[in-house]
Image (cartoon, coloured by chain):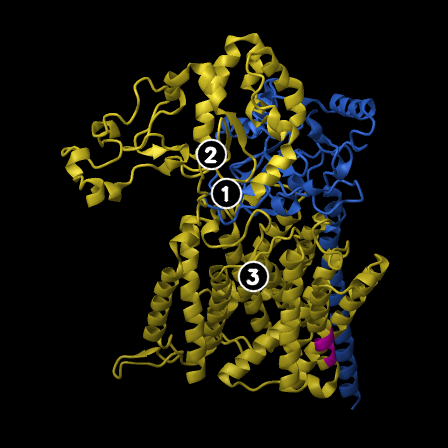
Chain colours: A blue, B yellow
Amino acid sequence: MKAILTDVTKCIGCLECVEACKEYNHLEVDVPRNWHRTDGLSAKNWTSILRKPENHYVRKQCRHCLEPACVSACPVGALEKTASGAVIYHGEKCIGCRYCMIACPYGIPRYDWESPVPYIRKCNLCFDKIRNGQKPACIEACPTQATIFGDRNELLTEAHRRIEAEPGKYIDRVYGEHEVGGTSVLYISDIDLGFLTYPVRKNTKPLPETTSTAMHAVPFAFTGMGALMGGIYWICKRREQLKQEKQQAKEDES
Amino acid sequence: MKKVTAFKSVLWTILGLALAAGVTRMIFGLGAITNQSDTTPWGLWKGFNVIPGIALAAGGFVVTAIIYVMRKHEYYRYAKIAVLMAFLGYLSAATALVVELGLPWMVWHPVVYWQHHSALFEVAWCVMLYLVVLFLEFVPVPLEETSRFAGVRRFLHKYKLILVVLGIMISTLHQSSLGTLFLITPEKLHPLWYTNLLPVLFFVSAIAVGPLMVILGVLTISAVYEKPLEREKLGKLALFSVGVLAVYALIRFIGLVAEGKLATMFVSSWQTLFFWIETALFVIIPILFLAVKQLRVSKAGLWVATISAVIGIGFNRANIAGIMLVRTGEIYIPTIFEIFISLGIISAAVLVFLFCVERFKMWETKWTDPRDRETAPPEFDRSSEAWLGSPRISHRFTFSFILIISLAFGFALISNERIHSEGIKEVPVKAARGGDTLYVDGNHDTFGVYFAHEDHIQREGKKESCVICHHMNLPMDESSPCSACHGNMYTEFDAFRHDWHSSPAGGNVGCMECHPEDQPRLAETAQSCEHCHKDLIPAGAEIEVDDYMAPSYTDAMHGVCVPCHETRAKQKEELKDLALCTSCHGFDHPEYLNKEIEMAFRDTSFNHVVLPFVGDLDKNREDMDD
């Protein structure tokens, strides 16, 4: 499974990756609109650089979770986690419910709000490139190798090697190794990257597991409720019958 | 019947406004009408119409369960009303969903593309199936009016119980699955609302509010049409809800205690306040008002309890589906048009409800068959030209007039900015400052570039080299600053001042002088500037000049510097770092400047250029801030 490792200490914030992404994916010029928010991601910007104090630059993009919440949330299977690691989007299936945007723990999927025929927009890890053994456009563009592409396990080893090689330089944590069950976009950093997700998660359980218990109960709830209603009906009917019989008996007596 | 007409007029007005907003949304997209954004992808329609709407339509399955399964035939009168309210509730929720979906014409996709891990997939299927069930449950009512389709009607009556039980089974699933929807957002939903019990809570609260909503419907009919009210019976039905409400409160309380959130309930915050408002409206007030016999059978008591419960459950669902969902600091306030559509859908449902109450036999407890009537009276008496049958739609003219006026008013309210957004904000540019070394920072945010002006002049060949960068001056001007034409930081700038050229100060230039007679008057077909301003662009200028649009300031600066730097970098191995962004923007990154760029500069003859500024970087910035 392929992955990206971004080393925040190496990023110089030159925005070459952003530009390469726009160029490769044929994204239009991003005209700021009322509905745009400040993290720089939008329907036409699939990756952005967040400028943090003291010359820290953090690239934001889809994390390509190993067990993505968006994929499990989508009611029509328009999102798909491929074997290559990329989470890709099938616009032809999408109905535009935006449940994936609700579900994503990183707030990544964006919407074509201005379009009358809108689609979900997000990084697809340049799926057609990596399928042919190439690197994603952003990786090719990076002048400082701050963001690199490769096999996920190898990148994890490399990340840990870098952290161990220069003790004290990095926070001793590979972001994306365990959170929400692991992601295919990893970060090592000398500043805390908690701002990339919603308030810090303590558990590292994949999000799809939160709904699976309830979803597994569905067939049982369905048949159970049917049986229960049948039972209640039978009891009520029987009670009525007995009452009638009693009345009949009383009338017969009198 | 003045009261009814006034009430309906208000509903038609809202409907007209909603239609205007709805048409605009369909033509120009969601962004034109809503304040929903990437941080609040679900807005008023999901949080007010769809999710609370389905809970409020639960009366259909709860009341039919009481009547047909538990065989409490004394409530038979309310069966038709409950089914109609549920049918309209689901239809209005479905309508809101269609408006809300980005691609509404794809709404049938869950039928074809299965994804059984998704709670929403399950809800979609259930709602579609339940709409069919509700239709079959309700359709005998209008069929009562005609002697046709009697076979269909009898068939549906015969298998009523199956339909009812099917409806209950389907409702169990989707009422709870609506809660499951939000289980996937543990880090977004406020802890007072997030619990693994959400599906159970959604289901139980729907059962509780269902009968109360039906009672509210009955109260409304009796108030609007002055029908007698069976308060004892309604009170008894409400008592059922009290029991379920108590169960709901118990489950919720135990859940909060078990998850160790007892303290959160008393933290002083607006979320806690909302929690208590919701609990008071949905649980405390209804239980208080309905547990006491005197209040339960009083009109006022029923009104207060049902309205409170209905608002309470709506508030609960809105909290979960929106208000408490995203805590990013972004505040979502729906636009007036979103509110129009929300209320408009409800208005339409109420109008259809009133129509059905007026037109069909909603109050009769016994089903009638037109063929059973001994002599059905003719509907239209030809001799007197009067309608004798059931009442026709009244006030057709008034309501059409109101609808058209409010529709027009609705369209008039929608501004251009609303549809096309406010667009790019202009960031005016100021000229660079400095002497031999210029500080190039158009928008003065201190993220600028130190440009060794004098050094470049010396190195590139004295005076003759000016044209490499200075490709033109404004007429009558010796040295125009770049910002004169590239006046906006991020967008293309209209460099040609049309109105000024045609003014007396601009020489009263007529149209024909620039625009050829036989061609359309477009910028593309107009004469170039040099046509009049012969010496505008110096001979040998290396930068191409667009005649009427100037690139943005940042684009222009990069366009001037980057090509030269890239050429030089290719020419000499030791200059290869000139192509790096840091060769100019290095002062943002002293660490790179020191290691790499310094070496590049050292190897060449211009090592005195940028370096002096590096040491005093912070001081320089402070100076700029002053």
For the residues labelled 3 and 2, the Cα–Cα distance comes to 55 Å
Residue occupied by mark 2: B432
Marked residue nearer the N-terminal end (3 or 2): 3
Task: Specify few, some or many for label 2: CA neighbours under 10 Å numbering under 14, 14-19, or 20 or more.
Answer: many
Q: For the residue carrying disc 1, how many other residues have a C-alpha within 10 Å: few (<14), some (14-19), or many (20+)?
A: many
| Residue under the image location 69 percent in, 52 percent down | B182
Query: What mark, if any, has residue A112 been given in the picture?
Result: 1
**Is B287 in the magenta?**
yes
Q: Secondary structure at mark 3?
A: helix
Provide the secondary structure element on which disc 2 rests.
loop
- In the image, residue B78 above or below residue B409: below
Marks 2 and 1, Cα distance to the nearest angstrom?
38 Å
- In terms of depth relative to the viewer, which is nearer, B407 or B161? B407
Provide the residue span drawn in magenta: B284-288
Q: How many marks?
A: 3
Direction from residue A166 to residue B423 in the image, left or right:
left
Q: Residue B593: x percent and y percent?
A: 63, 23
Q: Is residue B515 visible?
A: no
Q: Nearer the viewer, mark 1 or mark 3?
A: 1
Question: In this picture, is B205 found above or below A162?
Answer: below
Q: Quadrant of residue B618?
A: top right
Q: Main secondary structure of the magenta part?
A: helix
Q: Position of residue B339 (x, y in %)?
A: 50, 63
**In which quarter of the view is residue A96 placed?**
top right
Name the residue beneath numbered marker 3.
B49
Q: Chain of mark 2?
A: B
Quarter residue B398 falls in: bottom left
Q: Quadrant of the C terminus of chain B?
A: top right
Give the residue type that dot 2 points to: Ala
